[in-house]
Image (spheres, grey):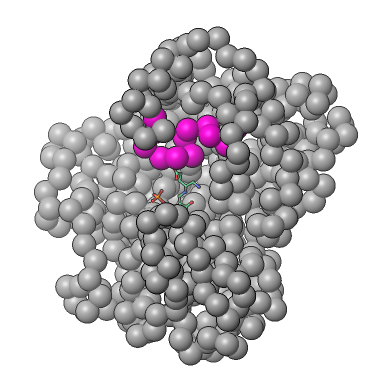
Amino acid sequence: MEQPNTKPATPQTASRNDALFERAKKLIPGGVNSPVRAFKAVGGTPRFVQRAQGAYFWDADGKRYIDYIGSWGPMILGHGHPAVLEAVQKAALEGFSYGAPTEREVELAEEIVRLVPSLEMVRLVSSGTEAAMSAIRLARGATGRSKIIKFEGCYHGHADALLVKAGSGLATFGNPTSAGVPPEVVQHTLVLEYNHLAQLEEAFALHGKDIACLMIEPIAGNMNFVRASVPFMKRCRELCTQHGALLVFDEVMTGFRVALGGAQSVYARSIPGFKPDMTVMGKVIGGGMPLAAFGGTRAVMEQLAPLGPVYQAGTLSGNPVATACGLATLREIAKPGFYEALGERTRSLVAGLTQAANKAGVPFCGDSEGGMFGFFLLGQLPQNYATVMTTDSPAFNRFFHAMLDSGVYYAPALYEAAFVSSAHTAADIETTVDAAAKFFAAA
Ligand code: KE4
């Protein structure tokens, strides 16, 4: 969600980043190939990455940053992990793309299904948007229904049916959030408030027999870091089951990031036997290469072409170099103790930031799960998008630029989660907390 443009907190000397940004803006809309990279929400000039290694990247002026974006989640092992690099180099020598099946796609499917118990089958695609879009079409085809539920503040990629904001009430369906999306395309999308039990009950009471699926980010990383409460998630599962709708977990961000089994394995700790009907995955699953997936029960997945009537396809789906990258990544994160160590490191960062802010009397709260974290310049953790929106965004922008000047790179938007990799050291965390403490002390 973008904020009005604001001036950067600190004037910047002309740099190669500035020159590159001016060059880029002549040829690429906004100078970027994905809007959030343009620093529009926080102001200032995006840093053009020259190279990255481990927990760091170096910009066009050779300045080093501790990287808490990690390509918006994929780089859970840090940049350039030796085992992943070796796998990619070897695969590239064997060929870039065939448009034909390979053993490695089978190996990756086997690994994904082994690690995520709710999955019986998966289909590999090239982006989270493609995976979410395909999952919606499959849910509609498998149920013969058209209506879908999503939640305000959750982002599932930029497929037309999902670029939608809440309608005027539960009886009315969504309105487009983007030009170019005709109202009739989102007429079947109902947008509810995240964590709002009464709205959830009413939506199913009104439309239950027409709902193909409910799609949710189980931990909403697109409103920074907001957890679905256990009672809310339990009710999503119960109502979907009761009304014959499919519960679709969008784990593009949380999958293999918050736990080896994803956020669904976190909820299963509190809700015995909890499983979604379908899961959308991306980011970590490709290890930084263009690879995503969607999966579910055999009964649902076998509705997909070429077996069933729901069409879905892709030239580069299951790309041999991308699958090598993803498989090598999954093999590393599946090693014993990986998430315990990663979770501890991430928690130490959030604790350090919170302590530094509180010491300076600055409202600050944060949360984390595995290698994913978020924080708010608020007194308590928000439960929904409207509360997230109450955050003082100019204050966040000042924080963002102060940290950037200190060589710490957070997401250039208040509404994004951030990520720790296994390459981040205790010293990196200390450097980060020290930089934040300086900012808070002067705030
Ligand atoms: P992609 O099409 O960008 O691979 O995935 C879309 C998507 C789907 N679902 C969730 C939960 C997601 O977070 C995303 C993409 N996340 C954003 C960052 N919040 C990617 C960064 C960008 O748009 O440049």
Residue 318 versus residue 80: which sits nearer the camera? 318
Residue 41, magenta (yes or no): yes
Picture coordinates of residue 158, whole percent (x, y): 40, 55
Q: In the rendered image, which quarter is residue 117 located in?
A: bottom left
Picture coordinates of residue 203, whole percent (x, y): 59, 81
Residue 433, magenta (yes or no): no
Whether 198 is drawn above or below 43: the answer is below
Which span of residues is magenta-colored? 31-42
Whether 443 is drawn above or below 262: the answer is above
Whether 288 is drawn above or below 80: the answer is below
* Left or right: 358 as drawn, with respect to 252: right
Residue 135 versus residue 319: which sits nearer the camera? 135
Residue 255 versus residue 390: which sits nearer the camera? 390
Name the residue located 44 percent from the left edge and 76 percent from the top edge: 188
Picture coordinates of residue 299, whole percent (x, y): 32, 81
* Left or right: 197 as drawn, with respect to 142: right
Name the residue located 62 percent from the left edge and 25 percent from the top edge: 7
Quadrant housing the C terminus: top right
Name the residue located 32 percent from the left edge and 79 percent from the top edge: 141
